[in-house]
Image: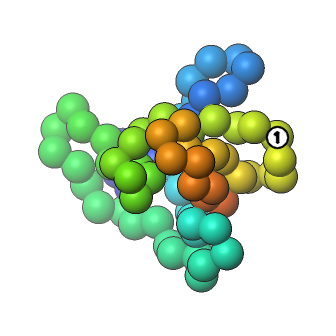
Amino acid sequence: MNGLHFQFNSIFGKSLFKVSEFRFGDEQYIKGHDKAPPEGKVFVLKCRCGSNEWTDNGRTINEYECDGCGQFVTVLERKE
């Protein structure tokens, strides 16, 4: 699974999708990448605090909250 992926918790369980672009808070968007990870691994977007526990709290579409520090990130899914 090449590229950057995003994993989050929802009412349906854990979800994973490929990232097109993301931004923390109101900062500029950053493009995902297509790098190949080591075999058996996946590149996953983590919070700046180091946590990988994101929740879709329903505040706005495509926005997720870090369970570790409360930071918000907006993530756009890559459609291929």
Question: What amino acid type should be assigned to the residue bearing mark 1?
Answer: Gly
Residue at horizontal 44%, vertical 52%?
47
Q: Position of residue 62 (x, y in %)?
A: 73, 52
Residue at horizontal 21%, vertical 32%?
40
Q: Position of residue 41 (x, y in %)?
A: 24, 37
Categorize mark 1 by other alpha carbons within 10 Å: few (<14), some (14-19), many (20+). few
In the depicted structure, whether residue 78 falls above or below residue 5: below
Q: Position of residue 31 (x, y in %)?
A: 50, 73
Q: Position of residue 39 (x, y in %)?
A: 17, 38
Q: Examine the rendering and report whether any part of residue 10 can be seen.
A: yes
Image-based side of 44 in relation to 41, left or right: right
Quadrant for the C terminus in the image: bottom right
Residue at horizontal 60%, vertical 78%?
27
- What residue would you read off at disc 1? 58
- Which element is circle 1 on? loop
In the depicted structure, whether residue 15 falls above or below residue 19: above
